[in-house]
Image: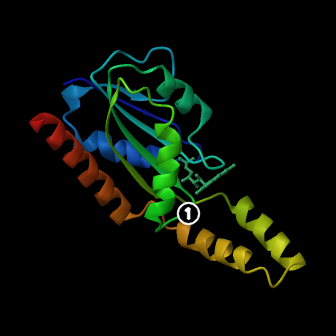
């Protein structure tokens, strides 16, 4: 079994998930681990991760995914918004739209990831102008909750997720 793990990560959250996934797999199976570049080898399985940028995966990851044919693909992501499987489903549906039908999708995983402080500063500026804006209040609460993510539980869930993916791949 040959596996490539490819990810995009701006501030380290998605990289953390990528590293825990790498740790969970047999090291001799991992042929490539890193960002999108021209040296990515041809492997059976592609485990692809991205941070969420304005509601979608990053452009480098999307462009890479679009080119894949006849591969097994597992996708993982981090997003500022947490605890919302419906939202994660929507995010993955967007990624899925770029996957050619010749590929087999093995599954997907998302967890929350902390955001840069500038995001909160912007919310604070906005709420100063509109103190009654409940959406902004929710966003600020979410920002504060995100600060501890990815946490130990997220990492444990990611490990379990990839373990199950590989197990069902081997038995299918
Ligand atoms: C410019 C920018 C846009 C973002 N857009 C979204 C978004 O649309 N939805 C979301 O849930 N999180 C969004 N986030 C939050 C990031 O996806 C989240 O913090 C992620 O864990 C960052 O991963 P990284 O540390 O691997 O870069 C955004 C963050 C930034 C900086």
Q: Is residue 78 above or below residue 137?
A: above
Residue at point 33% right, 47% down? 20
Viewport quadrant of the C terminus: top left
x, y percent for residue 40? 42, 18
x, y percent for residue 67? 48, 19
Q: Residue placed farthest to the left in the image? A: 171
Residue at point 35% right, 23% down? 102
Residue highlighted by disc 1: 81
**Horizontal placement of 14 versus 57: left or right?**
left
Residue at point 24% right, 54% down? 160
Q: Is residue 162 above or below residue 65?
A: below
**Horizontal placement of 112 versus 75: left or right?**
right
Disc 1 residue: CB within 8 Å of ligand 1: yes
Dot 1 falls on a residue whose secondary structure is loop
Badge 1 crowding class, 10 Å Cα cut-off, few under 14, some 14 to 19, many 20 or more, is: some
Whether residue 112 is visible: no
x, y percent for residue 120? 72, 67
Viewport quadrant of the N terminus: top left
């Amino acid at each position: 079994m040959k596996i490539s793990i490819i990810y995009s990560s701006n501030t380290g959250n998605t990289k953390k998930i990528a590293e825990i996934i790498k740790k969970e797999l047999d090291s001799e199976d991992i042929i490539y681990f890193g960002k999108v570049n021209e040296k990515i080898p041809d492997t059976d399985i592609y485990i692809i991760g991205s941070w969420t940028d304005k509601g979608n995966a990053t452009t480098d990851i999307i462009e890479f995914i679009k080119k894949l044919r006849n591969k097994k693909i597992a996708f993982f992501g981090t997003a500022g918004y947490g605890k919302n499987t419906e939202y994660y489903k929507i995010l993955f549906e967007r990624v899925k739209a770029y996957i050619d039908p010749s590929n087999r999708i093995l599954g997907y995983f998302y967890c929350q990831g902390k955001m840069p402080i500038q995001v909160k500063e912007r919310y604070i500026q906005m709420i100063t102008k509109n103190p009654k804006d409940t959406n902004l209040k929710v966003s600020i609460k979410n920002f504060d909750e995100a600060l501890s993510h990815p946490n130990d539980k997220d990492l444990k869930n990611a490990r379990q997720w990839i373990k199950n993916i590989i197990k069902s791949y081997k038995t299918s």
